[in-house]
Image (cartoon, rainbow, N blue to C red):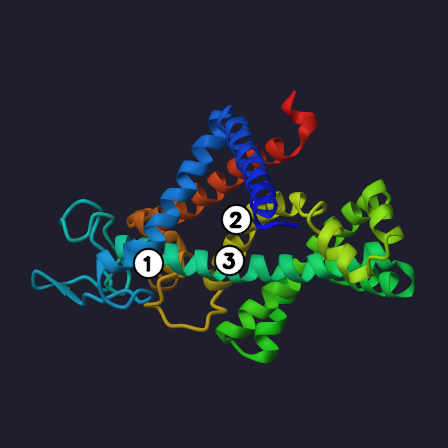
């Protein structure tokens, strides 16, 4: 094949991909709620990328203010908008809630990204093998998947953190163990359908190896549901992270900027009822940060599902 022919083939493939992306974005923007969800997600990502640098200090640690204007604020949180330095007020311990919410965006998105993409990668590989090869190997993989899916997620994470220690690596590994089975089951179902297609049979008849067939044909045509699941699992992982930190199964101290950890400060230092009654912003503001982000992810995920399913475009 000449250089010109190769270049022309690449240009056609690139134009086809760009046109497909443009059409997908068009269908996504037809849904106002999905567009709103995407806009909010992008805003959170921007905050996670540049917010900690703008706030200053350690990007994952909140600065402590024992005194403010000569008054102790460790056990007397400042309400929102009373001082320009604390637009969201402070929480127990003398920590700025605004700083915690901004820095917490980076912490939660980074941790969720590691868990979700690692789980998706493991699940994609195992699901592809189980669906394409089948047999004893497929049965072993799927029975192991069923075992992990039958375990209560939060209980399994708590058990692993208790036995192995409250470390960041243990928390991430525990959540990956929880999340990979879902992707394995999804991918296996897709692969069982794709492997019966004519182009897969033609590839095998032409002498393509199993590995090449899986990488070139099976996975690319089975991966679209994974994108939807990833968008939904981001919110679930962040909720689980917040729950673990709220329950005290943390690898860091009270100054660690994580949304669930900020809520935990209010309930631990001020007692849950007292914090909600006398200092409601210490719980509601970080709680709203979680709620808005998770809701936006779900709205975007629903829109993405509609885009990737041709039957829903009609």
Q: Residue at x 28, y 61 (%)?
A: 92
Mark 2 nearby-residue class (10 Å; few <14, some 14–19, many ≥20) = many
Q: CA distance from mark 2 to mark 1?
A: 17 Å
The earlier-in-sequence mark between 1 and 3 is 1
The earlier-in-sequence mark between 2 and 3 is 3
When the figure is inspected, residue 58 is found, relative to residue 88, above or below; the finding is below
Q: Residue at x 27, y 52 (%)?
A: 98
Query: Foreground: 197 or 92?
Result: 197
Q: Looking at the rendering, which quadrant does residue 68 occupy? A: bottom left
Query: Foreground: 267 or 125?
Result: 125
Number of the front mark, 2 or 3:
3
Q: Which residue is mark 1?
A: 103
Residue 308 in view = yes
Q: Which residue is mark 3?
A: 113
Mark 3 nearby-residue class (10 Å; few <14, some 14–19, many ≥20) = some
The x, y position of residue 143, in whole percent, is 83, 62
Task: State the mark number for residue 210.
Answer: none
Disc 3 is placed on an element classified as helix
Q: CA distance from mark 1 to mark 3?
A: 16 Å
The x, y position of residue 50, in whole percent, is 29, 54
Badges 2 and 1: C-beta atoms under 8 Å apart? no
Instruction: Report the side of 78 relative to 299 (left or right).
Output: left
Disc 2 is placed on an element classified as helix
Q: Looking at the rendering, which quadrant does residue 308 occupy? A: top right
Badges 2 and 3: C-beta atoms under 8 Å apart? no
Instruction: Report the side of 39 relative to 221 (left or right).
Output: left
Task: State the mark number for residue 235.
Answer: 2
Disc 1 is placed on an element classified as helix
């Amino acid at each position: 094949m000449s250089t010109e022919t190769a270049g022309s083939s690449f240009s056609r493939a690139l134009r086809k991909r760009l046109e497909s992306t443009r059409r997908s974005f068009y269908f996504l923007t037809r849904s106002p709620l999905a567009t709103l969800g995407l806009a909010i997600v992008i805003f959170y990502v921007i905050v996670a990328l540049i917010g900690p640098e703008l706030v200053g200090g350690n990007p994952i640690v909140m600065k402590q203010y024992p005194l403010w204007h000569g008054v102790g604020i460790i056990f007397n949180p400042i309400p929102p908008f009373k001082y320009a330095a604390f637009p969201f007020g402070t929480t127990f311990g003398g920590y700025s809630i605004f700083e915690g919410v901004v820095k917490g965006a980076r912490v939660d998105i980074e941790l969720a990204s590691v868990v979700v993409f690692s789980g998706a990668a493991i699940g994609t590989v195992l699901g592809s093998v189980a669906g394409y090869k089948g047999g004893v190997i497929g049965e072993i993989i799927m029975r192991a998947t069923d075992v992990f899916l039958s375990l209560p997620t939060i209980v399994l994470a708590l058990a692993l953190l208790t036995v192995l220690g409250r470390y960041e690596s243990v928390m991430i590994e525990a959540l990956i163990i929880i999340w990979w089975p879902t992707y394995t089951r999804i991918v296996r179902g897709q692969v069982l359908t794709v492997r019966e297609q004519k182009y897969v049979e033609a590839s095998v008849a032409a002498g393509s190896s199993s590995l090449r067939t899986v990488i070139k044909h099976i996975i690319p045509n089975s991966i679209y549901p994974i994108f939807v699941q990833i968008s939904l699992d981001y919110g679930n992982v962040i909720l689980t992270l917040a729950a673990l930190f709220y329950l005290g199964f943390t690898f860091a101290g009270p100054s660690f900027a994580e949304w669930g950890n900020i809520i935990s400060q209010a309930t631990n230092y001020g007692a849950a009822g007292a914090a909600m009654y006398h200092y409601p912003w210490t719980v509601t503001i970080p709680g709203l940060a979680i709620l808005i982000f998770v809701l936006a992810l779900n709205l975007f995920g629903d829109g993405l599902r509609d885009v990737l399913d041709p039957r829903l475009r009609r």
